[in-house]
Image: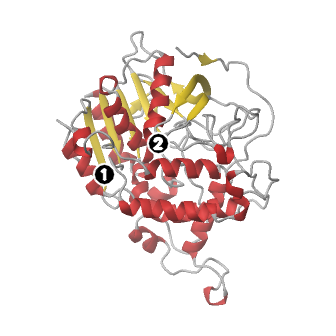
Amino acid sequence: MSHPVPTTGSTPTGAVTPTAPVGAPTSGRPVPDRTTRTTPAGAGGPTGDHSGRPLPSTPPRASSAWREGDPVGRRRFVDLGALDLEAGGRLPDVRMAYETWGTPAPDGSNAVLVLHALTGDSHVTGDAGPGHPTPGWWSTLVGPGAPIDTDRWYVVAPNVLGGCQGSTGPASTAPDGRPWGSRFPQLTVRDQVAAELRLAEALGIGSWALVVGASMGGQRALEWAVTAPHRVRRLAAIATSAQTSGDQIASFHTQLTALSADPRFRGGDYYDAPDGEGPHVGLGLARQIAHQTYRSAAELDARFGRIPQGGEEPLDGGRFAVQSYLDHHGDKLARRFDANTYAVLTRSMITHDLGRDRGSVEAALATVTADTLVVAVDTDRLFLPEQSARIAAGVPGARPLHTLRTPYGHDGFLIEHEQLGPLVREHLEG
């Protein structure tokens, strides 16, 4: 059995991951109050700052992945050994970074697993600080007195395998002492869950009171419930799918193409590039494509419409406010994430299929024994409500499908905490 690597009193010194930039376009029209106070950066990322302050002029690092020597923050680490991968290949030395809140019960019965989305990480709740350039991305759902009350529940949140915030990923050091880069193998959602299963074993957690995830995190939550049904007592799958659709694959493909077309991507071997010389254009463009699926068409039109960005004239080469908004989010991600990780995790979403080698999606869903809550977002154009309905219909005894009503699209799972919170609380405590 693997054992956690102690971190108490061992915070390394060294380069600090730069804080996420602030500022956003000014659209000339008011933004609804709920967006102002909880506007997320998209699909599980930290909350955005739309204050109108200018973006930093300093060039971003080639990669903003967490590296050895950066501040540890709240992270803990566990070494899991070698991991054979579903698509072939092997990772010889897997390390998982994770964070915890609350106190485990003596019998481990109060453990909750929270799984982040594409550009999220283990910092689910808490303030920004050394090692955590942004505050927790789901603090409205997790924390003292929150729906997942850390005064009662022991919450564990890993950084996904292939991630860039402490878990083994493309920016990690390979056995030859160099970053994995282009040599990092293809991962699937099942590989990621296999690593998380080992993490649970290392922590001595036999079963979870709840496994909860949204978006990409929801895909892993579903895989948990099928791979290890005896270890998942309750399941919450939010704004997600049991199988990636053709439309989703098409969107993910264009994002990968935009990223790889950046000459500074260098096939994935850019970690020795100086500041400002990394694949920031490609990563930013990929994010802009994705961000359109995180928000609804109605919200973007109501919020920005055809208003020009302040001081710019579209007929003279200037931008509309919505263009500036997308530029802002592309720049933000380039300053806090890693391009290779974006590619690795996006490919894992492309290949996501709960029914692979299990007969069918419905056959796989039929094996879920957890008390299951499925939540859709009515304006979601990334994970369509019918995909959530398929999950709810396929899991034996699943609770009736719940739907968040929101103008904000897929990001509703981050914004509409007044709707989502009571559902999760009731499911966990019921």
Residue 407 found in image quarter: bottom left
Q: Position of residue 217 (x, y in %)?
A: 43, 42
Marks 2 and 1, how far apart at CA: 24 Å
Q: Is residue 40 above or below residue 68?
A: below
| Residue 141 in view in this figure | no
Q: Are marks 2 and 1 in contact (CB under 8 Å)?
A: no
Q: Where does label 1 land, which residue?
A: 376
Please state if 397 lies on the left or on the right of 391 as rendered.
left
Q: Residue at x 80, y 31 (%)?
A: 13
Say what amino acid the circle numbered 1 marks.
Ala
| Residue 359 in view in this figure | yes
Q: Position of residue 100 (x, y in %)?
A: 53, 26
Q: What is the secondary structure assignment of the residue under circle 2?
A: loop
Towards the viewer: 158 or 102: 158
Q: Position of residue 292 (x, y in %)?
A: 48, 65
Quadrant position of the C terminus in the picture: top left
Q: Where does label 2 land, which residue?
A: 188
Q: Position of residue 391 (x, y in %)?
A: 26, 46
Say what amino acid the circle numbered 2 marks.
Thr
Q: Nearer the viewer, mark 2 or mark 1?
A: 2
Towards the viewer: 90 or 249: 90
First along the sequence among labels 2 and 1:
2
Residue 227 found in image quarter: top left
Please state if 340 lies on the left or on the right of 34 as rendered.
right
Label 1 neighbour load within 10 Å: few <14, some 14-19, many 20+:
many
Q: Residue at x 62, y 79 (%)?
A: 319
